[in-house]
Amino acid sequence: MLLAGASMLIKPISGTEKKVPIIWLILISLIIGCITGFFGIGGGFLAIPILVLFFKNTPAKAAGTSLAIISLNSLTAFLGHFQGWSSVDWTVPISMAIAAVVVARLASIKSVDVKPEILRYGFVLLLFSISIFTLAETWILAP
């Protein structure tokens, strides 16, 4: 995550969007999936910088791609655990879903007024904060 945050500080390569060759897409997806599985970090933290910096996607398109992947992963996990649905207190996930939709809508309305650089630096700050917290929790706070 530290590398992903540092890569977001690099100015994106200018030019037109590159079409991602299928072999690269598969290779990058496997690497991101392995890192996500081994370290428990979200794939979006890795996919967005790669799509923006190396494949010249717009940040909005990269974020949308990341959200599509997260949606597919979540749907797969949701359907894969259908045996446990009866033991779930559905008020919690439904409340979280409603809150996520409301916050996402408000953020999309307000994002028009915010410069893209500020959003990018905010994302970098979030990545660095999570990285430092994770490192501290793992190495310093671990018993």
Image: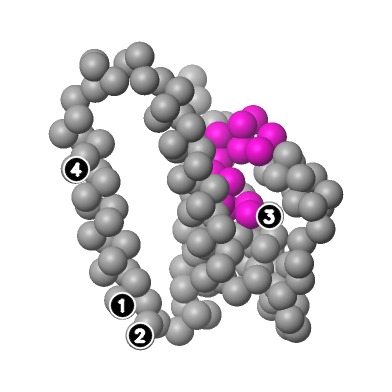
Give the labeled residue for mark 3.
Answer: 3
Q: Is residue 95 left or right of residue 31?
A: left
Q: Label 1 sits on what residue type?
A: Lys
Q: Is residue 131 visible?
A: no
Q: Which secondary structure lies at badge 1?
A: helix
Q: Is residue 40 left or right of residue 10?
A: left
Q: Which secondary structure lies at badge 3?
A: helix
Q: At which x and y percent is residue 58?
A: 60, 74
Q: Label 4 sits on what residue type?
A: Ser
Q: Which secondary structure lies at badge 2?
A: helix
The quadrant where residue 40 appears:
top right
Report how far apart the C-alphas of labels 2 and 3 lie in the structure: 29 Å
Give the labeled residue for mark 2.
Answer: 113
Tag 3–tag 1 contact (CB < 8 Å): no
Bounds of the magenta span? 33-47
Q: Say the numbered circle drawn on residue 95.
A: 4
Structural crowding at the residue carrying mark 1, measured as other residues with C-alpha within 10 Å and reported as few (<14), some (14–19) or many (≥20): few
Q: Earlier in the sequence, mark 3 or mark 4?
A: 3
Tag 1–tag 2 contact (CB < 8 Å): yes
Report how far apart the C-alphas of labels 2 and 4 lie in the structure: 28 Å
